[in-house]
Image (cartoon, rainbow, N blue to C red):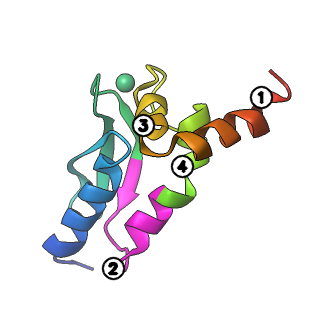
């Protein structure tokens, strides 16, 4: 089933991930999945589908903030960790404390 990518959604996804230091690459599968690349070193850190509704990409990245902050998601080089710290230091510190118990 062919699907024409919706530029608005793709742009929205691009901007949502750019916020945490992740670059949206060309589609890995035609018009369906986009590769997510580390904004610092270019390593692939995941995929995202373009079948999101308006607002979903930003909400998704927002929900993943703590994981990026603690290195559970994102690139091993630590770029997303640094970026999220700059976005919201208070939340970032809280995330470290929650995940720091076992460290
Ligand atoms: Zn990286």
Among numbered discs 2 and 4, the one appearing first in the sequence:
2
- Tag on residue 100? 1
Tell me the tag on residue 86. 3
Q: Residue 75 vs residue 42: left or right?
A: right
> Any mark on residue 65, and which?
4
Among the two numbered marks 1 and 4 on one chain, the one whose residue lies closer to the N terminus: 4
Q: Is residue 46 left or right of residue 9?
A: right
Residue in the image at 49% along x and 22% along y: 76
Mark 4 lies within 8 Å of ligand 1 (Cβ measured): no
Is label 3 or label 1 in front? 3
Whether label 1 touches label 4, CB < 8 Å: no
Question: Which is more toward the observer, 50 or 72?
Answer: 72
Label 2 belongs to which residue?
54
Instruction: Based on the picture, tell me whether residue 49 belongs to the magenta stretch.
Output: yes
Q: Is residue 31 visible?
A: no
Eyeballing the image, is 100 above or below 95?
above
Stretch of the chain drawn in magenta: 47-61
Question: Dot 2, crowdedness within 10 Å: few (<14), some or many (≥20)?
Answer: few
Circle 3/circle 1 CB separation < 8 Å: no
């Amino acid at each position: 089933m062919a699907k024409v990518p919706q530029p608005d959604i793709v742009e929205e996804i691009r901007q949502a991930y750019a916020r945490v230091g992740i670059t949206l690459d060309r589609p890995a599968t035609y018009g369906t999945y986009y590769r997510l690349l580390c904004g610092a070193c270019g390593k692939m850190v995941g995929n995202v589908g373009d079948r999101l509704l308006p607002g979903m990409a930003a909400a998704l990245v927002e929900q993943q903030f703590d994981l990026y902050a603690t290195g559970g998601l994102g690139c091993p080089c630590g770029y997303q960790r640094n970026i999220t710290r700059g976005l919201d230091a208070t939340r970032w510190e809280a995330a470290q404390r929650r995940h720091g118990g076992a460290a």
